[in-house]
Amino acid sequence: MVKISDLNVGQVIKNEFSGISRDLLKQYAKASGDTNPIHTNDAIAERAGLKGVIAHGLFSFGFISKLFEDFLEQGKYGKINEIGVEMRGMVRVGDLLLTEAAISKIEGKKVYFDIKQTTITNVDIKDTNGKIVKQFEAGERGYISEKDLARGLVKTKEVEEGILTYRERVATPGTSVIELFE
């Protein structure tokens, strides 16, 4: 049960999704009616200036609304009054999509959130000598740009197989207001 008395400014709700695949994007295109081939066909996406297919904007936005619907147990404890986002970064096949919403204010029964949807894009794993042990689609297709490097979005961390290089960037920032029924 979600109650105002259980919520605090700074509290974060979140979800993660790691199943973005070409097949899923094709299913989404069919279900949504948005059959723009930049979402389903690499050759056409490349001709459009992309380095491969990208997820639909509303596909990733759906994970934001799902976060709040799950939190409110599909309307059992409240309703979504508004969600406003800026779609700034592309979401790609293989990305880990992290959606977080931090409570910024509570007024009466209304709860205000700052939203941050982040993509984690794996590039490659190298051994201690710098040799590539595993390369992901982002490394193969060159998804990481000089701009990403200059902005400090490309990071590394140790994993079991070696050193993982990945990009972490906010793809969709925004805000939301929900209203609880209690």
Image (cartoon, helix red, strand yellow):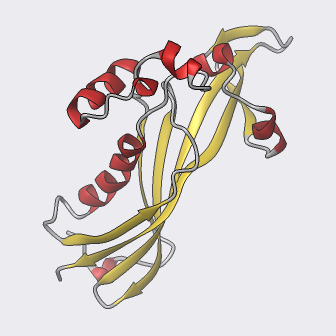
Image coordinates of residue 53 in percent, x first then y, are: 49, 24
If the image is split into quadrants, where does the N terminus sit?
bottom left
Identity of the residue drawn at 24% across and 34% down: 33
Q: Is residue 87 visible?
A: yes
Q: Determine the residue located farthest toward the bottom in the rendered image.
A: 108
Q: Determine the residue located farthest toward the front in the rendered image.
A: 47
Image vertical order of residue 86 relative to residue 107, above or below: above
Image vertical order of residue 84 relative to residue 178, above or below: above
Identity of the residue drawn at 55% across and 38% down: 90
User: Is residue 99 found left or right of 83 in the rendered image?
Assistant: right
If the image is split into quadrants, where does the C terminus sit?
bottom left
- Quadrant in which residue 158 is drawn: top right
User: Is residue 149 found left or right of 166 in the rendered image?
Assistant: right
- Quadrant in which residue 80 is drawn: bottom left
User: Is residue 181 found left or right of 29 in the rendered image?
Assistant: left
Identity of the residue drawn at 59% across and 17% down: 137
Image coordinates of residue 100 in percent, x first then y, are: 47, 56
* Number of marks drawn: 0
Image coordinates of residue 59 in percent, x first then y, are: 36, 40
